[in-house]
Amino acid sequence: MSNVIYVLNGPNLNLLGKRQPEIYGYETLADVQAKLETKAAQSGFTVEFFQSNHEGAIIDKIHEARDKANGIIINPAAFTHTSVAILDALNAFESPVVEVHISNVHKRESFRHHSYVSLRADGVIAGLGTFGYVAALDYFINLS
């Protein structure tokens, strides 16, 4: 396996930069992708970037990552709080996982305080805006 990191994004993140910018900022998911691709390339890594509003599509990408990736950065968005299926898929992935949230979920509604994904994640980054993705990628670069 080469230095491939999957960056998986859940529902509504396709609206990043437009949806509730007071919470999530004005940077788009395409902006985040471009930033990560540049940083990864400078460090000898590749990112496989993916977003879906469908739980099964995210699970399929996690399964694919088992044979292709050295790690997963995942922002499961609303699936964070509901998806045992994503947790089960991540439990079958043997390399490191970093969970990322743009907002500080612990300062928001109480239902957002619980994460199924955190039960598997090797690290959790929340509240740093889109820089959280960069910090997660730095983690993988420093592991190599």
Image: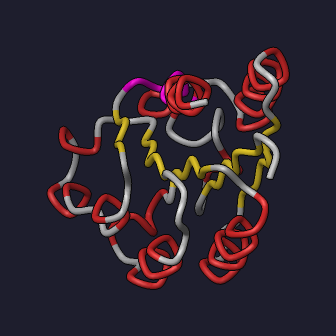
Q: Position of residue 52 (x, y in %)?
A: 70, 65
Q: How is the image coloured?
A: secondary structure
Tell me if 82 is positioned left or right of 89 in this view. left
For residue 12: magenta?
no
Rendered location of residue 22, percent (x, y)? 44, 27
Q: Quadrant of residue 43?
A: top right
**Residue furthest top in the image:** 42
Q: For the point 59% across and 60% down, which residue is it?
A: 10
Place of residue 1 in the rendered image (x, y in percent of width and height, measured from the top left): 80, 53
Residue 100 image-quadrant placement: top left
- The range drawn in magenta is 128-133
Q: Residue at x 82, y 19 (%)?
A: 38
Q: Image point 60% across, 78% down: which residue?
A: 55
Residue occupying the point 19% across, 43% down: 106
- In the image, residue 16 sits, relative to residue 36, either above or below, namely below
With respect to residue 68, does 135 lie above or below? above
